[in-house]
Image (cartoon, coloured by chain):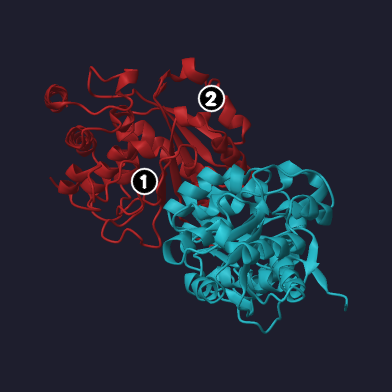
Chain colours: A cyan, B red
Amino acid sequence: MPEVKKVALRDGFGQGLLELGRRRSDVFVLAGDVAESTRAELFQKEFPERFLNMGIAEQDMVGSAVGLSLSGKVVFISSFSCFLCSRGYDQIRVSICYNNQSVKIAGTHAGITVGPDGATAQALEDIALMRALPNMTVVVPADAIEARKATIAAADWPGPIYLRFGRPPVPIITNEQDPFEIGKATIVRQGRDVVLVACGVLVAEALAAAQALVADGVESYVINMHTVKPLDEATLLTAARTAGAVVTAEEHQINGGLGSAVAQVLARNFPCPMEMVAVSDVFGESGEPEDLKEKYGLTWKHIRDKALDLIHAPKLRC
Amino acid sequence: MTNGLEGLTTERPSSALLKQKAYEVRRDILTMLHAAGSGHAGGSLSEVEILLSLYYYKLRNDPGNPRWEGRDKFVLSKGHCCPGLYTVLAHRGFFHREELLTFRKLGSRLQGHAYAGVPGVEASTGSLGQGLSIANGMAIAARHDLTDTRVYCLMGDGELDEGQIWEAAMSASFRHLDNLCGIVDRNHIQQDGFTSVIKDLEPLVQKWEACGWHAISVDGHNLSQLMDALDVAADTKNKPTVIMAQTIKGKGVSFMENQTRWHGRAPNTEELEKALAELDTAYRRSIAGA
């Protein structure tokens, strides 16, 4: 196999910020002491007058962003997802969402692939937290190219928006020229036997699973559901009606994430056999990203196995 | 009733007008709380003079154009005390005074905690501790844009238990936000009791000073002291100012003053009549004595 180029999603975020900063003078970026790690530093170096390091104070960062936003600024706040979403949750709920201010919440180091830092640093509940909030949009890009596009698209998005980025370099699986639209899922592969709906770094795993499933005579329909909220119901239902079985895959807790969002849509519109690849309601631990993905059931093999389960025993499940 | 003042307020209003407004606003607060059947009487009554010093003197705004770009901004961080703010906004002409009677009713703009859908309310608040950070952001934006907008934030003293206030206090002084003025409604009572008993805040002035703020203590029911303090704050350079307004919770109604149980209560009909009669008598006496 040819060597796949790997880039971290946070690098795509930093690049997107830089492009935005050059393009428009109303963009502000706030950081929570981890600007180098989140790559917000790229913006800081070129636009120091529009960059504010708020220190280790996520609650204050959220509120200050709202004050800037109410004053007409386009504001990105950035920190590790685990701190930003959880520590700043009430502020995100009231100051951002209730005021319906289009603050762009960029959480980096999301998911279990943050690795050796362990459970406290591994945001695995952020999608659930964010998608529960009225007015909020939730975007989980699949690679660095999509991360850059999502960052740029977020600047013009009218409401509160959460962008989820990971830490380690991961395979580039989209192309620069691919269209990207918030709220519009990308069909990566067409197939008639099973739908694999994934977001974030698990889109690459879903593609690998689809390739492996060919050997089993299974043709997979693969959807990159980069926007978890609002979910692209039309694309999901078209695929589900074609294949009749759905497997979701996400680097997140099983409760409240992409799997829950997909199940909600299917239950109301097209109940069909479904499985979820996600972290099974436990905290993570220290380890290398690939080892953690293996241990916590987040690889292409896990997706393949769940797909085969559905295909071979759908009737038993219904 | 007249609005008292129209458009910009650059001169100090007469003490007669302010006295009249303090009386009318307290009457309206109690009447709207009674109509709603719930709400926060104590802190709404303690903040009346603070709000009057802002909306009848210091704030540059335009009731006919609440989003006027050149305006000064006010954030009510203690969002539960919105009855005071709504009433003062109505008296200043931001919306009709009759609407006050819809407070807390289904479909009303006048939500139970300060709501930005109400003309003149800059930010929705209600979860304590969040307003000062928002005010900081507004002050940072105003300075970046080279405008002379000033930003004011009214906090409750019990609210100062929240850690976010002190995160914001450090940010404001670190960034030398001299276009920002915080005001503390120091009425010494929070929901469960006296602040000194729940989680003592003292030495409070020193806390703000240690955070790099210019602190001024005033009698929070004395309008000339409040207006003086707002003037001093506007002239203070390189650091934010906090006005520690010493107030009485439930001010103006004898059976509500300094009573913890009136933090989160509305008067029933009998209590309302008694309270309004007290306010009437006190106002008549003060005019006669003037």
- Compared with A57, B206 (above or below) is above
- In this view, the mark in front (1 or 2): 2
| Chain that bears disc 2 | B
Q: Amino acid at mark 2?
A: Leu
- Mark sitting on residue B58: 1
Q: Is residue A310 visible?
A: yes
Who is closer to the viewer here, B1 or A166? A166
Please provide percent x and percent y for residue A106. 63, 58
Q: Secondary structure at mark 1?
A: helix
* Left or right placement of residue B126 versus residue A143 in this view: left
Seen from the viewer's position, the closer of residues B54 and B141 is B141
**Which corner quadrant holds the N terminus of chain A?**
bottom right
Q: In the figure, is residue A116 to the left or right of B70? A: right
The amino acid on which the numbered mark 1 sits, given as a three-letter code, is Lys
Asked if residue A162 lies left or right of residue B86, the reply is right
Location of mark 2 (residue): B204
Q: Residue at x 22, y 53 (%)?
A: B95
Label 2 near label 1: C-beta < 8 Å?
no
- Mark 2 lies on a secondary structure that is helix
Mark 1 closeness class: few <14, some 14–19, many ≥20 residues within 10 Å: many
Q: Quadrant of residue B185?
A: top left
Q: Is residue A277 above or below residue B181?
A: below
Task: Give the farthest residue toward the top.
Answer: B197
